[in-house]
Amino acid sequence: MRGKDVFIVQPTGNPTNENLMQLLIFIETVRRDSAGRITAVVPYYGYGRTDKKDQPRVPITARLVADLIHTAGADRFLTIDLHAGQIQGFFTIPTDELTARHLMVEYFQEKNLQDAVVVAPDIGAVRRSRNFAQDLRLPLAFIEKRRSLQEGSILDMSNLIGDVDGKDAILVDDEIDTGGTIVRAAQLLRKCGARHIYAAVTHAVFSDPAPERLRNSEFTEVVVTDTLFLPPEKRCDKITILSVASLLGEVIWRIHKGISVGDLFNE
Amino acid sequence: MRGKDVFIVQPTGNPTNENLMQLLIFIETVRRDSAGRITAVVPYYGYGRTDKKDQPRVPITARLVADLIHTAGADRFLTIDLHAGQIQGFFTIPTDELTARHLMVEYFQEKNLQDAVVVAPDIGAVRRSRNFAQDLRLPLAFIEKRRSLQEGSILDMSNLIGDVDGKDAILVDDEIDTGGTIVRAAQLLRKCGARHIYAAVTHAVFSDPAPERLRNSEFTEVVVTDTLFLPPEKRCDKITILSVASLLGEVIWRIHKGISVGDLFNE
Amino acid sequence: MRGKDVFIVQPTGNPTNENLMQLLIFIETVRRDSAGRITAVVPYYGYGRTDKKDQPRVPITARLVADLIHTAGADRFLTIDLHAGQIQGFFTIPTDELTARHLMVEYFQEKNLQDAVVVAPDIGAVRRSRNFAQDLRLPLAFIEKRRSLQEGSILDMSNLIGDVDGKDAILVDDEIDTGGTIVRAAQLLRKCGARHIYAAVTHAVFSDPAPERLRNSEFTEVVVTDTLFLPPEKRCDKITILSVASLLGEVIWRIHKGISVGDLFNE
Amino acid sequence: MRGKDVFIVQPTGNPTNENLMQLLIFIETVRRDSAGRITAVVPYYGYGRTDKKDQPRVPITARLVADLIHTAGADRFLTIDLHAGQIQGFFTIPTDELTARHLMVEYFQEKNLQDAVVVAPDIGAVRRSRNFAQDLRLPLAFIEKRRSLQEGSILDMSNLIGDVDGKDAILVDDEIDTGGTIVRAAQLLRKCGARHIYAAVTHAVFSDPAPERLRNSEFTEVVVTDTLFLPPEKRCDKITILSVASLLGEVIWRIHKGISVGDLFNE
Amino acid sequence: MRGKDVFIVQPTGNPTNENLMQLLIFIETVRRDSAGRITAVVPYYGYGRTDKKDQPRVPITARLVADLIHTAGADRFLTIDLHAGQIQGFFTIPTDELTARHLMVEYFQEKNLQDAVVVAPDIGAVRRSRNFAQDLRLPLAFIEKRRSLQEGSILDMSNLIGDVDGKDAILVDDEIDTGGTIVRAAQLLRKCGARHIYAAVTHAVFSDPAPERLRNSEFTEVVVTDTLFLPPEKRCDKITILSVASLLGEVIWRIHKGISVGDLFNE
Amino acid sequence: MRGKDVFIVQPTGNPTNENLMQLLIFIETVRRDSAGRITAVVPYYGYGRTDKKDQPRVPITARLVADLIHTAGADRFLTIDLHAGQIQGFFTIPTDELTARHLMVEYFQEKNLQDAVVVAPDIGAVRRSRNFAQDLRLPLAFIEKRRSLQEGSILDMSNLIGDVDGKDAILVDDEIDTGGTIVRAAQLLRKCGARHIYAAVTHAVFSDPAPERLRNSEFTEVVVTDTLFLPPEKRCDKITILSVASLLGEVIWRIHKGISVGDLFNE
């Protein structure tokens, strides 16, 4: 290892804590073995959703994990599609955040959908969906979920804002965990008159009961990437997996050689 | 100062760099003078909008400033309505983020508007607007701005998603800087048939030409707070200023006494 | 939590990584919630055996974990019977290491064994066993394991150094993980003529197949503590569990009150 | 920027806080863009005069700023003529301090002044003036300012210590800010019989009313450098500007190439 | 120690390295023993003269030592008469620098010297001497030493600037190490016609051959303090020792009680 | 120095504090002079025996010193035969620990001793002795020292565990300081019937009265290395010095070139 430019690739999907500790131990081992530079390559950043303190007594684990990776001794961080762009700011070490959006957009362009609309399944996905819609030159809609206290019990109500009637709809998000949000979103779109319903989601976390839910869902197709390994038993006909391998490979090579990564996306 | 519990109140509005450096120098002075604990009270956090690296070669100044405040020697940070909740995670020291939303909501509840809608003037304001709408039990709409390349030139196009026709509209955002976004949003709402148009915005940064723009705008009323001092010449009939003074005072007192701040908002 | 003196009790037994990450997240949550002082109480320190770099390309995880606990924001660390005393030096924050030895010694004194000997099951346990023997005024022996290359294959050979023939023997160690070492040690002692064979071990990690191995072992009695919860299905007749609860409780109270902890053991 | 050896040149003259924050933001941007090494080149170090705590409740801003530059992410620091040599010790990162003295000395040697004396305008300038006098082989004098309480009011009295009668005098200092000290020094020298009066000062801060004061002063010539840009309207016939550009260029080149900087001054 | 407010008093005179390491080890011991707050009380700061990098390849040991004291775990630093005020800025932890000047001034006031002058024995002592002269309302002179290359060899030449003829002279400095500078200064003053010659110096380092040199010197009296213990064999008739004990005691008490230290000197 | 790969060789034997501070000052000097990488080469690590807190109110100086070396600015640490392997974990910077065991083993192999045994002189030396015995394929014994309270006074009693009767014995340890332990161990071995008695010890600290004690001891030969310079007057006929120079030279060269150090020992 002595003096080498080391890249440690470790997605932090389930079991997240196990994978994360392994990453930290790898980094520390390599550092004590005098590696020249250590880049933590974490295609899926597991605690990204815990990124703010929107109520008392909750952690900001996405920041904690950034600090742990720094403490273990990583010099750089490379990831794909963080839950929020601000998470880059949680890192003290230089980071590169790649996006699988271009891959996804290209895939949908080839479908040549007529009269389609991009839909954000919740508020956290609006920015991501807008960028997606802009690239595909499609209109945007979004689903707003709110809690209301009615007759003594808390109700979660979802409203579609925008128009999907008679159109194909593409739901865009960063990850599918248990699948609850996105599957309910598809149901709402169906009720609102959507024709074919697609999902374009980078990270296939697929905790139980996501595989079951997706199998029985309104989706025509759910497009994900291989930032996380999806075991065969969690797949079904509706799932399409795009590979980020060559993107990641190219970027690792550029980082190693000291070539601009930004240019890759501007060409 | 020796051993005292010191609160340094310094909003970081225009001129931001000047105000920020003053804050840092104050903190360092008080620290070297052996203050017991130093809380930086920054009602308006000036670099909040530079919170992510959405293109190469841009800084994450909101993180840098958090580090500078830490380096200068602050032990705690207290602020109001950050541009994004994640900014709390930029701080290593414990932070309290207050919100002026309750003040605003109460003010609008008293207006007793019939058939109103809350509108997010852009994507960054959607979450804030949703919370506002939820508190007022009003529907939500939002304005999506996107760039498109048409006939060789870049066009910024805005679409309203949702419905405002014949309704009163309340545009919700965290700050008005030059006023361009929110004033154009009001024009779009007018075009889409909105009746009275209001703004509910925490921070009145009001850089030129905001005062002029607001004076000539479609707004019936622009409700802001005094997290920043608004000099008389920047005010006009349309501007209503709500005071955060007693909120801030109460919270400073609670921090000093070690009483829960979270409880203040749950009561 | 604000301003409170918080003690977070979390042993880091199986699953170690899971428990450890939970501890780190708890600490960070409490710190961001403005706790006054945070003491991580880790009765069993899970990575204690990875405490030195005795060959290339191995980590010193015991140091890494100390750094992680510090990074998460703990102010103090409290533990029981570390694998090596030097691990205290891995911590930057003040630590208190308690020992269950006094409990164990008292328990064996009451047995009033005639003609007994304390035996270290391997080299890492020699110091601990000597202290135990000294307290009980018993002679000491130890088992030396070495690797030798014989006829092309590696052999692990164990020798007893010292005398156990016709005596009761007490094997002393810090933890039983899979039980391999200590069960083989008991077999060797049996072969060397030991009468009753006991074990006095602080941490009952009991990974598989430890429960099975112990059930079928030469041991008359295996005395452990409750630094780790031992589920009923892992227990058997041979297992005696001494409780460290009142020791730990007393020390937490002393730390909270700022009373000497050292005096507790000198009285 | 990736992997490049970046030099950021930013003097921190008026407006100091603005210029300083810009420097910090530049450094952070370049660091997050993965620059290989970042050298902050600050020809004029703006807060150099606030370098000690000679009374309670004052900051040591020169140290704070050194810490801020470090926090922002600079790897090295390069400057010219600090107010006190100790300020180098405020930096944790390696620093190079250049001096414009050789330039100045050469310029005055060519004047071939007969019967001249170097004068320190106040106590802080004595060491600098001595070095200057030594290089030019001229005698040294200095002006001592002290506060005395007389008849109930505080008087600032200046005494010349040493002899200037009938001689040309060169006042040496590191910076001219508002010009008060040095212009009063020139008046005192005139009163004490000095012939031609010169100033040799590195940094032309020239805050108001320095330009006016210098124009109307007793000086024959005020020699400064271009570590700060001096706008035409602040210049006058008496001002001579020597350029540090080639010195700075040479040193940047040497740092980039890893060639000794010290040797440059010993040749 | 647990929770106590600990003050460790350790001057760092000869042997400086030994004394310094002892101080660091004491601090670390007390910190690991959970002291509440640790103040390093260093009446004489041994490496103060190595405070700037005035030539290549020299250390700034005064900064290094400040960092070591911080690393060992001190929370505060208390000292007397640093060689340069800027050294306070080398510390990251809050510091209090006391001065023995008031003691000294009082002592000389009682002598009621007629027609006296304060003299700085070299350039580094000018500021200190000016403050002394101002307090005693006496004029100031100083001795300038410079190196010149004459006929191939380096000559150190000293000039008196100012007037001492027929007057009593008080040489003021922060420390006497080997005594070379101040004894030569006294010889020069004698040559220039001074009557009685005194020294007022805080720290009596008195390395060999200082005791011998002082015994044979032109001094009428050498006034020092007991910031360093002066063994009887290093004393002689000419040496007067003033005690800083009650000053130090008072300040330690104020720090402990959280009472202003600055006020002590303003009364 | 600029940009160079600097190795600073400084054993920290007597006087330890003096040597250690010199090392720290060297490191800081070289760092401020912009060295490219600094490796502290400390063949003998002086505070290694203070590596754990086995009673209240003792320091862990071995950790403190590791932190001081880091603070001074070293990038790497290289040493030989630490007192305990865990000390590597005290360092934050990458370390290489070499061993003189191979040298020693080779030397004893050439002696071709018949019927020999390796003996650990106390508990701290058991692991080291076991490795030595394993390499030489010899049996192991050890001496256990314990304190017992008998008739009101504390007695230190030593027991040999294992068999040395009629055999040659090799006592193995990391250092000889005052020589008390190892000389008493030799006496005990003589009493137990050992034939020739050897010592194999890496670091010849040899504080008084070690030279005298060894001269008069039961040892046939005491084999040490030159990690510390042994002045001629401390040597005697019984002392054999093996040189680590070529080992150290080879490793420094490998570190400089970025070649694996671990491979050196596996060949």
Image (cartoon, coloured by chain):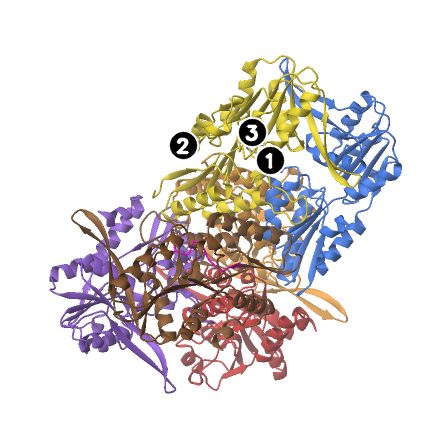
Chain colours: A yellow, B blue, C brown, D orange, E red, F purple
Do the dots labelled 2 and 3 sit on one chain?
Answer: yes
Along the horizontal axis of the image, is C244 left or right of C51? right
Q: Nearer the viewer, residue D169 or B213?
A: B213
Number of disc labels: 3
Q: Is residue E237 above or below residue F30?
A: below
Q: Chain of mark 3?
A: A
Residue at 28% x, 48% y is: F262
- What amino acid type should be assigned to the residue bearing mark 2? Lys
Q: Chain of mark 1?
A: A
Mark 2 or 3: the one toward you = 3
Q: Is residue C42 magenta?
A: yes
- Prevailing SS of the magenta stretch: loop
Task: Find out whether the residues at labels 1 and 2 contact each other: C-beta distance under 8 Å.
Answer: no
Dot 1: few (<14), some (14–19), or many (≥20) neighbours within 10 Å? some
Query: Mark 1 highlights which residue?
Result: A84
Along the horizontal axis of the image, is D3 left or right of E127? left
Query: Mark 2 highlights which residue?
Result: A257
Q: CA distance from mark 1 to mark 2?
A: 28 Å
Q: Is residue B186 above or below residue D54?
A: above
Q: CA distance from mark 2 to mark 3?
A: 44 Å
Q: Give the structural element (helix, strand or loop) at label 3.
A: helix
Q: Is residue B96 above or below residue D58?
A: above
The label shown at residue E96 is none
Is residue E245 visible to the viewer in this orientation of the structure? yes
Image location of residue B127, percent across then percent down: 70, 35
- What amino acid type should be assigned to the residue bearing mark 3? Glu
Part of the protein shown in magenta: C41-51
Q: Give the structural element (helix, strand or loop) at label 1.
A: loop
> Where, quadrant-wise, is the N terminus of chain C in this rendering?
bottom right
Mark nearer the N terminus (2 vs 3): 3
Q: Give the structural element (helix, strand or loop) at label 2.
A: helix
